[in-house]
Image: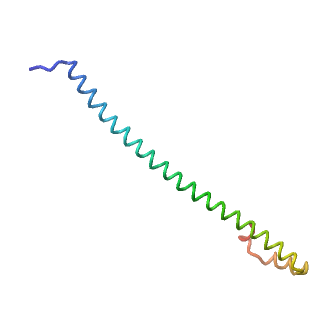
Amino acid sequence: MKQNPLMQSVAVAEINAQLLCQEYANAVHRLHIAKKDVCFYADQASRAHSQYLNAVRLKGRSYLDLMNSGISHRAYLRFLRSTEPCLNF
């Protein structure tokens, strides 16, 4: 018995629709995972930025405390020259 060409095209279209539906579901799942990853890394970046700002504030406060401690200008400049370049934010 020969199949009707219209029935065959409907069957092919249904199979294509099912495959594309699965592909869409997989893409949506990957998108949800990516959104969670972005939120995680954004939180990490925010926390690191906050810690950096606190370190800069503490550095400034400690330098002011050192200058206000009565240390001589020469000793203060010697201290500044002796500090590591990586500590200069």
**Quarter of the image that includes the N terminus:** top left
Residue drawn at point x = 22 percent, y = 18 percent: 6
Q: From the top left corner, tell me how far across and down residue 84 is, in percent.
A: 73, 74
Horizontally, is 83 left or right of 17 in the view? right
Q: From the top left corner, tell me how far across and down residue 75 is, in percent.
A: 87, 81
**How many circles with numbers are drawn on the protein?**
0
Residue drawn at point x = 30 percent, y = 35 percent: 19
- Against 78, residue 6 (above or below) is above
| Color encoding of the figure | rainbow
- Against 11, residue 27 (above or below) is below
Extreme left residue here?
1
Q: Quadrant of residue 55?
A: bottom right
Q: From the top left corner, tell me how far across and down residue 40 is, in percent.
A: 52, 56
Horizontally, is 84 left or right of 46 in the view? right
- Against 23, residue 33 (above or below) is below
Q: From the top left corner, tell me how far across and down residue 14 is, in percent.
A: 27, 28
Q: Quadrant of residue 56?
A: bottom right
**Quarter of the image that includes the C terminus:** bottom right
Horizontally, is 26 left or right of 80 in the view? left
Residue drawn at point x = 62 percent, y = 57 percent: 46
